[in-house]
Image: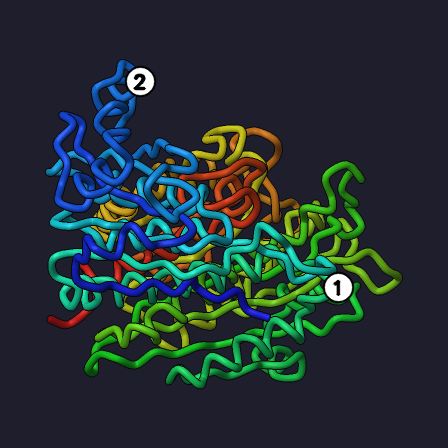
Amino acid sequence: MPTTLTPVSFTATDIDAIAQATGRVAVVVDPEGRMGQSARRVNRLTKGAVKRFVDSDGFAKVKAGQVTTLAWPVGMEAQAVDILCLPRAHSVEEARKGGAALAKLRGSKDLLLAADGTRRVAEIAFGLVARDYTFDDHKSGDDENAASGAVTITCSQPEAAQETAAPLMAVAEGMFFTRDLVNAPANVLTTTEFAAQLKALSSLGLKVEVLDEDDLAKLGMRTLLSVGQGSDSPSKVVVMQWNGGGDEAPLALVGKGVVFDTGGISLKPAGGMEDMTMDMGGAGVVAGVMKTLATRKAKANVVGLVGLVENMPSGNATRPGDVVKSMKGDTVEIINTDAEGRLVLCDVMWYAQDRFAPAGMIDLATLTGAIIIGLGHENAGAFSNNDALCNGFLKAAAAENEGAWRMPLGQAYDDMLKSRIADMKNIGGRAAGSVTAAQFLQRFVKDETPWIHLDIAGVAFVKSDTPLAPKGATGWGVMALNRLVADKFEAE
């Protein structure tokens, strides 16, 4: 079952309702200790408890976006009062941080956030909803920590807040879809099930096509098929079109969808292999972006293409040393079957350009461990042949606080892919592994196509909480790519 968003309602400020509110009540106080109408009412109800905290040394250490709790306040029905510290001229990041902090505290309780004249209440709501995520499809019984209570935000302009929040909630829908896909175990999210979930997006107005192995063979997607030929799960390519613009060429998003990666014959070590359920993270992000664009009815043309395969060792699996011809016609010597994502992407990227002649193309993949060595879990690696497109994306990512860092490309790296018996090898050796992977992909980018490769191996799935997500799948990239579409590809 898809994880649903926490419902949030916006209503007019009603200070008389605060005393009877159950669950948790939150109020906003700025770093100077100034309180709005609702905070002052809570202060009176609690016989000055809010003012005593604001005047304490502890409050002086509280940063913007942080929340402090007063438990079991006297004079109120609520179990707790949460004091959200926000400057009057707070940033989007601070507002989202504050919402996320409230989400972590509330658990399954009802929450009344009395925001009065606070700015960016829609962004607070977005931060709250984005962080209020749990993946418990495979847990038996009820999860007492599951978010289920109602969230009400009282503010001075509830209708305007609701209107501003609507497209943000569409982004949250896409993020949750991505997280659900990436968190799902491989015996549940098979290539067939993945394709079925994407096909269901047609109910939002997307045009969705599923290309099966016979279709892929006719198209000549031999490198993609070579990755999945050792698995019983059939390889597929899913094409999702959102035609919300005019006659302009679409932006193409291409995602690696390896639903499980054993490494194939070049078998991975056992330790940590269970995490390879997330090797379809690129396809998950593409799916989430397409859901967001369709939900908010974006005035843009965007096509999302994902290659869905499973990389397994068997008597039919591709061997190291095999030579395979790509859809483009170039031959590839397979040195390492664990460098399989680029073999999936190269065929889908060539198909995307042949069929759609896109205005730009962005591929996303959990492609290399090398990018984690270089950038850790803070930034995705961005490789590009086009400064304007790349700078536009980096600006969008920065605006959404999603880390991305531009990495180099160059002929010396490309030369590392030379093969004795084929047009290229699928790996260039240990040095600069993420760069040579990008160079491999660039060989399948036409000269006229602006292109970005995003290596998201370090940011798609993490072992600790992020500002807007619990540990596990993050949904990284949905916000940034949605912002890029809005900034650069959407009609006014």
Mark 1, other Cα within 10 Å: few <14 / some 14–19 / many ≥20: few
Residue 105 picture quarter: top left
Query: Nearest the camera: 196 or 174?
Result: 174
Q: Quadrant of the N terminus?
A: bottom right
Q: Is residue 415 visible?
A: no
The percent position of residue 27, horizontal first and vertical second, equals 25, 42
Badge 2 marks a residue whose secondary structure is helix
The percent position of residue 182, horizontal first and vertical second, equals 58, 56
Kind of residue at disc 2 = Gly
Q: Which residue is mark 1?
A: 187
Q: Is residue 429 left or right of residue 288?
A: right
In the picture, the disc for residue 430 is: none
The percent position of residue 435, horizontal first and vertical second, equals 47, 38
User: Number of numbered discs present?
Assistant: 2
Q: Is residue 316 left or right of residue 397?
A: right
Query: Nearest the camera: 181 or 359?
Result: 181
Q: Which residue is mark 2?
A: 58
